[in-house]
Amino acid sequence: MATIEIHGVPPSPFTRAVRLAAREKGVEYELVPTMPGNVPINPLGKIPAMRHADFTLYESPAIVRYIDRTFEGPPLWPKQPKGAALCDQWVSVVCDSVVQSALAGVIAPRFGIIPGTEESIADGLKRTARVVGIIDRHLAGHHFLAGEAMTAADLFLVPIFFYFPEIEELKALGGASPNCLRWAREMGARPSVKATDPQFRGLNG
Ligand SMILES: N[C@@H](CCC(=O)N[C@@H](CS)C(=O)NCC(=O)O)C(=O)O
């Protein structure tokens, strides 16, 4: 029997971040197929949610932290306060700025998941270019987002950045960000990233 249940679906970036964390920690999980809006263990109706024995939890950063604190395996947050705080900072940058600009502004409308106009997508692209520029400059001096070791912050960025090649404008932006490309090549070689590839190219194609 799997150790934890993860309720969600593979294309969901937040669900993938939680699956990545479980795999990196070596925690066995059952993916319980669950669509947004019909999530018995999350009153907000969002995915992912998690069950561990009689304990349930929602909000992906909380779930990833719980997995990290509860199970043995490589730490997903640095132990030192400053390193841990920087990791939290980058998790927040991804879950706020990258999600708002790239996911909600460009990927979801281009994939036909939410409505968007060419004007709103152009605005999303502009905002994505700003935050990707910040990340690219940061990765010029650091191997991973929170320093020299892979952390939860990288696991939150993977699901979104790995959709970039599916969308022409984001592919061009990613391709012009050499340090992000180096990071993506290294992250893409990890078994956890390969095993959670959603194989999703949007509702239109
Ligand atoms: N803050 C939440 C966001 C989760 C989220 O927005 N999930 C999307 C799917 S990727 C969802 O369920 N959307 C439906 C909704 O917002 O009602 C988390 O980190 O878990």
Image (cartoon, rainbow, N blue to C red):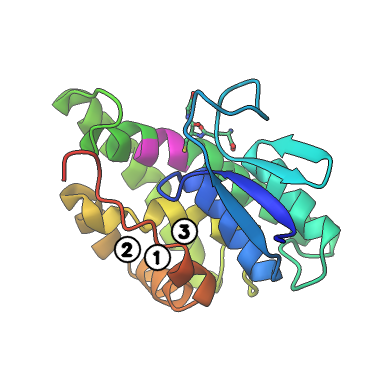
The type of residue carrying mark 2 is Ser
> In this rendering, would 26 be left or right of 178?
right
Whole-percent x, y for residue 170 in the image: 25, 50
**The residue stretch that appears in magenta:** 98-103
Q: Pointer 3: residues within 10 angstroms few (<14), some, or many (20+)?
A: many
Q: Mark 2 to mark 3: distance in Å?
A: 15 Å
For disc 1, the marked residue is: 180
* Quadrant holding the N terminus: bottom right
Q: Is residue 146 visible?
A: no
State whether residue 187 is above or below residue 113: below
Q: Main secondary structure of the magenta part?
A: helix
- Please tell me in which quadrant of the rendered image residue 77 appears: bottom right
**Camera-side mark, 2 or 3:** 3
Residue 11 seen in the current view = yes
Instruction: Compute the Cα span from label 3 to label 1.
Output: 11 Å
Query: Which residue is depicted at the point 64% across and 69% down?
Result: 24
Label 1 amino acid?
A: Cys
Q: Earlier in the sequence, mark 3 or mark 1?
A: 3
The residue sitting at 38% across, 39% down in the picture is 103
Residue 121 rendering spot, x and y as whole percentages: 23, 31
List the residue tagged with mark 3.
158
